[in-house]
Image (cartoon, rainbow, N blue to C red):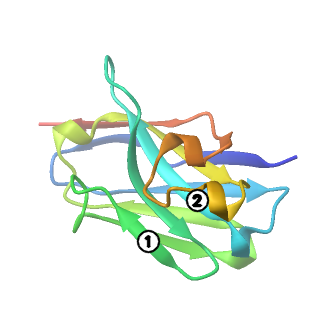
Amino acid sequence: QVHVAESGGGSVQAGGSLKLSCVVSGYTFSRVYMGWFRQAPGKEREGVASIYTAAGTTYYAEAVKGRFTMSQDNAKNTLYLQMNSLKPEDTAMYYCAASTRSWGSLSWRLQRADFNYWGQGTQVIVSS
């Protein structure tokens, strides 16, 4: 059974930084398609960034390009999301997700339907 667990959220002032972590168990972390999503109150869940860990191929939403960076530690089965220059509009619950779906069914464009395992979320609050 695949399990995904994110952590590292918190409260920061605008311009600050946070680093989220996502630990994956029950699957080969070095060859998995992973994504970060976020959901603000009253809004739909939106994609933030994704990575295929075997190749390090990344995709970032326009809203976070140049500010957020993913990295991975295969020895720890952990994906990271470094968030810099945070803005109040980054305030949301952040979710980590993993995909075990077949490659042919993936959009590779950070679509929710690509991912079938989700963490419980970690809250990020950015104050102005």
The answer, for residue 24, to whether it is visible in the render is: yes
Residue at position x 72%, y 59% from top? 102
In the depicted structure, whether residue 55 falls above or below residue 16: below
Residue 111 in picture, x, y percent from top left: 47, 46
Residue occupying image coordinates x 48% and y 51%: 36
Which numbered disc, 2 or 1, marks the residue that appears first in the sequence?
2
Q: Quadrant of residue 13?
A: top left
- Please name the residue that numbered disc 1 is placed on: 58
Instruction: Estimate the x, y position of residue 96 in percent, counting from the top left.
Output: 56, 47
- Out of 32 and 39, give the one closest to the viewer: 32
Q: Find residue 124 and report its image quarter.
A: top left
Residue 39 is labelled as none
> In x, y percent, where is residue 115?
61, 46
Distance from Cα at disc 2 to Cα at disc 1: 10 Å
- Amino acid under label 1? Thr
Q: Residue at x 61, y 74 (%)?
A: 53
Q: Quadrant of the C terminus?
A: top left
Q: Residues within 10 Å of mark 1 (few under 14, many from 20)?
A: some
Q: Count neighbours of disc 2 (C-alpha within 10 A) and say few if under 14, some if 14 to 19, many if 20 or more.
A: many
User: CB under 8 Å between callouts 2 and 1?
Assistant: no
Residue found farthest to the left: 128
* Residue under label 2: 34
Secondary-structure class at tag 2: strand
